[in-house]
Each structure stands twice: as structure tokens, then as C-alpha cells.
Amino acid sequence: MKNLIPILVLITVSISLNAQDYAMVFPASIKIESKNDNYTRLNDFASDVLLTKDFNYRDFLKSSKNSIVNFQLNGESFTKSEFTKILRKGAKKSDSYAEFQQFLNSSYPQFSSVLSNGNKHLIYEKFNKGTFNSYFQDLANNW
């Protein structure tokens, strides 16, 4: 009995001291890694689009729906399929490459900074292919 009280006191003190060791600490380097990771994801997305020989928007959209990749742009999170739809809408609304480039620079500067001007032009051509505007342009050019 004489030893029971000091033993219980030591156990409670040791438990309270060890309980502080299990606090979760998040270092500041996680934000840096996520920025680099986001850059590589954007770069991979652009290379997926650019390296596809016969790019078909519908097929690419179907394959992107199965992807779990998320992009962080302007404080918002987009899935691969949502970002694909955004680029298609931007290409459809633009009458020329200059308007598409302005759309990218104003709306998504992070994605725009990943691409060179030549790659932006190729992405515009691939996403604009098959749109109503491109059909009219082809019709006017081939008339």
C-alpha cells in the first residue's frame, strides 16, 4: 500500500509527459512540395495533350474522368476533367489564338507560365479542333 500511491503518481505523470509527444507537426516544406507537385501535374497535363497524335476531345475527356489528379489554380481546385472542359470552353469562345492566349493569361496565369507560346498555340489548335467555329473557318478556307 505504501508503494501503490507513489507508483500511481509516477504513472500519471509519465502518461501526461508522453502524451505531448504525439502532437502532429506540419513543416513549412509541405507547401513548397505541393507547389512543385502542382507544376509537374500541369506540365504532365500539357504534355499529355501535346503528345497525343490524333487528339480527340471526347476521348481525352473520357480518360480524364477516370483520373484522380487535381490542379490548384488561383486558389481553386480542379479535377483533370474540369480543367479539360475549361480549356475547351476557352478555345470555343476565342475567335483566334490571341484571344485564347489572353484568356489563359488572365484566368489561369499559373498554367500559362508552364507553357511556351508555341505550346499554347498547339493546345489552342487541339482544343479548338471540332468546334463550331473551326468548322466555319475550315469551310471558309476550303471554299
Image (cartoon, rainbow, N blue to C red):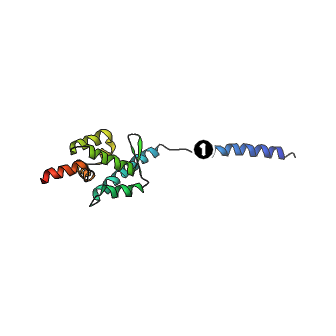
Few, some or many residues within 10 Å of mark 1 (<14, 14–19, 20+): few
**Residue 106 drawn at (x, y percent):** 30, 38
**Farthest top residue in view:** 106
Query: 85 or 114, which is in the foreground?
Result: 85
Question: Considering depth in this image, is 114 or 83 the residue closer to the camera?
Answer: 83
The quarter holding residue 2 reads top right
Which amino acid type corresponds to the residue marked 1 in the rendered image? Ala
Asked which secondary structure carries label 1, the reply is loop
- Tell me where residue 84 appears, x and y as whole percent: 34, 50
What residue is shown at x 29% (from left), y 57% (from top)? Answer: 56
Identify which residue is drawn at 31% across, 41% down: 109
Which residue is situated farthest in the left direction here? 143
In this figure, which residue is indicated by the disc labeled 1? 23
Q: Nearer the viewer, residue 121 or 57?
A: 57
Number of labels in the image equals: 1
The furthest residue to the right: 1
Whole-percent x, y for residue 77 in the image? 42, 44
Residue in the foreground of this view, choosing between 131 and 43: 131
Q: Is residue 64 above or below residue 109?
A: below
Horizontal side of 113 relative to 37 (left or right) equals: left
Q: Residue at x 41, y 55 (%)?
A: 65
Q: Whole-percent x and y of residue 43?
A: 33, 52
Q: Is residue 10 left or right of residue 36?
A: right
